Image (tube, rainbow, N blue to C red):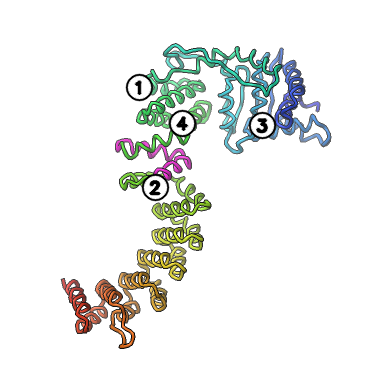
């Protein structure tokens, strides 16, 4: 292809070989040598837009060069890499390691965040990467200005041995080892002994980084220092660092500085770090607001940490704190909705219960689906959660739940309907009471008719409170519960029914009626 430089041709071929023929080491070595020849005396650039246009104009599907360049364009797009700039006489290691990074599986849609982490870890000295749509540029580490007070060693640092085996190929391994010596000083510089730095100094470095305009490795170093603090269980100090970094990320305009702060925050939002932050919620009341904000900013990762802590805690006070933090985490609902598809019934049960606690009405459809779950305990949790949501869809599912095959689910459905206090449910409850055989469910139905009084409901309670015929005597427990329900209803017809029951032949019934009437008169 005439529109593609020889360097791009050989580099794309190297990437293709690494991705499709990892054992073809001789071919990889040859393409690497040819690519380095092109960049030995002058810089080279690989622009996604240019190579995409070049391959789009070529229709020959048998051209291997076109295929490898086309794949390079696809991989660059997948990694959100807009352009790669190779300095003249770029180190061998830089070209090889960058080709490996491009050959790896991309994280689509992350604006180059995952690829940038790889680039930072490689300590490239002769390559500049342009990433994402925001114009972020990852400059080579070797060109990084070192500013007093921003990047500094505080204690003697032992030598670092850099080893990256090259799949058993001795030639490539020698190339690798030779190139490693060129970046050894940069690696040593980055291995800062964060344990000896005070938190005020660390916060001061964040302030300087925000104003410096070159915070790339500086923020990486600060994040590493925060990880050192975490290793020492100094979680309140970690919270200070994370809060300050978030403060600057929020106020900065788009560009390299904001991007650097975003990457630093993302590095500190790993589950292990957030777990330490979450533990402070229960033990440090003064940090609850800050910890809740940081966990919320971490999205679903922060929500997952809170969910794990809430489910795993057996202390009521801790559970309340975690639940309150979860309510302030917008991503919590999505995390819980994902868990509803889990194969483990107890995970689904816990997620359903938490969705009810959060009161997110939009979750009602998924919870309604759980009312047909194979596990009884899941259906119970779903009924409780639907009662707390109180939507029309929830009420309809609960009315169907009072016909469930499990008495436990029927009871929970009835109590959930009672919590909704919707008079439209009364005809359903009356019909259910007429056919219900389980005593516990009958008790719940009777109590609910008293809690949501209607004329039809009170009439059904009167029938439940009556003694019955000579051949079929009603259980005393049912009659007593109906008397309590009539007293709770307190309507004129309910009061009149209680007055009539004061003449009942059962002393226990008469005593209960007298107490009920007394409560109504008080």
Give the label on residue 76, or none: 3
Q: Quadrant of the N terminus?
A: top right
Q: Residue at x 44, y 11 (%)?
A: 156
For mark 2, give the secondary structure: helix
Q: Residue 454 appears at what percent x and percent y?
A: 33, 76
Distance Cα–Cα, label 3 vs label 1 = 41 Å
Q: Are marks 1 and 4 in contact (CB under 8 Å)?
A: no
Q: Residue 84 appears at what percent x and percent y?
A: 65, 24
The mark nearer the N terminus, 1 or 4, is: 1
* Position of 8 relative to 393 (above/below): above
Distance Cα–Cα, label 1 vs label 4 = 19 Å
Give the label on residue 327, or none: 2
The residue singled out by tag 4 in the image is 268
Q: Quadrant of residue 195?
A: top left
Q: Quadrant of the C terminus?
A: bottom left
Q: Are marks 1 and 2 in contact (CB under 8 Å)?
A: no
Q: Residue 330 appears at what percent x and percent y?
A: 44, 46
Distance Cα–Cα, label 2 vs label 3 = 39 Å
The mark nearer the N terminus, 2 or 4, is: 4
In-image side of 148 versus 470 (left or right) = right
For mark 4, give the secondary structure: helix
Distance Cα–Cα, label 2 vs label 4 = 22 Å
In-image side of 259 versus 11 (left or right) = left
Distance Cα–Cα, label 3 vs label 4 = 26 Å
Give the magenta part as a residue range.
284-309
């Amino acid at each position: 292809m005439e529109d593609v430089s020889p360097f791009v041709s050989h580099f794309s071929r190297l990437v293709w070989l690494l991705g499709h023929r990892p054992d073809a080491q001789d071919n990889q070595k040859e393409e690497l040598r040819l690519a380095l020849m092109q960049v030995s005396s002058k810089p080279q650039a690989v622009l996604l837009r240019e190579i995409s246009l070049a391959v789009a104009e070529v229709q020959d599907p048998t051209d291997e060069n076109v295929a490898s360049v086309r794949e390079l364009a696809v991989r660059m797009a997948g990694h959100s890499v807009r352009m790669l700039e190779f300095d003249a006489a770029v180190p061998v290691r830089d070209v090889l390691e960058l080709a490996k990074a491009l050959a790896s599986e991309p994280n689509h849609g992350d604006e180059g965040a995952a690829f940038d982490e790889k680039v930072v870890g490689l300590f490239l000295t002769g390559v500049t990467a342009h990433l994402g749509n925001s114009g972020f540029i990852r400059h080579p580490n070797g060109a990084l200005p070192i500013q007093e007070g921003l990047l500094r060693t505080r204690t003697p640092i032992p030598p670092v041995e850099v080893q990256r085996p090259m799949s058993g190929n001795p030639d490539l391994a020698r190339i690798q080892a030779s190139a490693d010596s060129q970046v050894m000083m940069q690696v040593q510089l980055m291995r800062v002994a964060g344990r000896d730095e005070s938190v005020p100094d660390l916060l001061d470095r964040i302030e300087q980084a925000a104003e410096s305009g070159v915070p790339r490795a500086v923020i990486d170093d600060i994040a590493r220092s925060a990880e050192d603090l975490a290793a020492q269980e100094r979680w309140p100090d970690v919270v200070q660092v994370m809060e300050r970094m978030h403060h600057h990320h929020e106020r900065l305009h788009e560009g390299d500085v904001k991007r650097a702060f975003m990457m630093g925050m993302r590095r500190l939002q790993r589950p292990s770090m957030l777990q330490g932050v979450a533990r402070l919620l229960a033990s440090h009341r003064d940090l609850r607001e800050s910890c809740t904000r940081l966990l919320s900013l971490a999205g679903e990762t922060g929500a997952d940490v809170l969910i794990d802590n809430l489910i795993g805690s057996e202390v009521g006070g801790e559970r309340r704190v975690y639940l309150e933090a979860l309510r302030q985490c917008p991503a919590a609902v999505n995390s819980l909705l994902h868990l509803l598809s889990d194969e483990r019934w107890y995970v689904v049960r816990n997620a359903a219960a938490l969705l009810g606690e959060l009161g997110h009405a939009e979750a009602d459809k998924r919870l309604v689906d759980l009312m047909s779950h194979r596990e009884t305990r899941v259906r119970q949790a779903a009924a409780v959660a639907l009662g707390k949501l109180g939507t029309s869809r929830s009420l309809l599912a609960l009315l169907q739940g009072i016909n469930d095959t499990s008495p436990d689910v029927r009871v929970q459905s009835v109590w959930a309907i009672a919590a909704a206090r919707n008079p439209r449910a009364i005809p359903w409850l009356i019909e259910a009471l007429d056919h219900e055989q389980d005593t516990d469910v009958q008790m719940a139905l009777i109590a609910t008719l008293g809690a949501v009084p209607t004329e039809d409901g009170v009439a059904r309670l009167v029938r439940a409170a009556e003694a019955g015929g000579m051949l079929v005597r009603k259980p005393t427990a049912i009659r007593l519960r109906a008397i309590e329900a009539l007293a709770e209803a307190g309507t004129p017809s309910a009061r009149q029914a209680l007055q009539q029951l004061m003449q009942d032949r059962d002393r226990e019934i008469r005593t209960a009626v007298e107490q009920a009437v007394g409560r109504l008169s008080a």
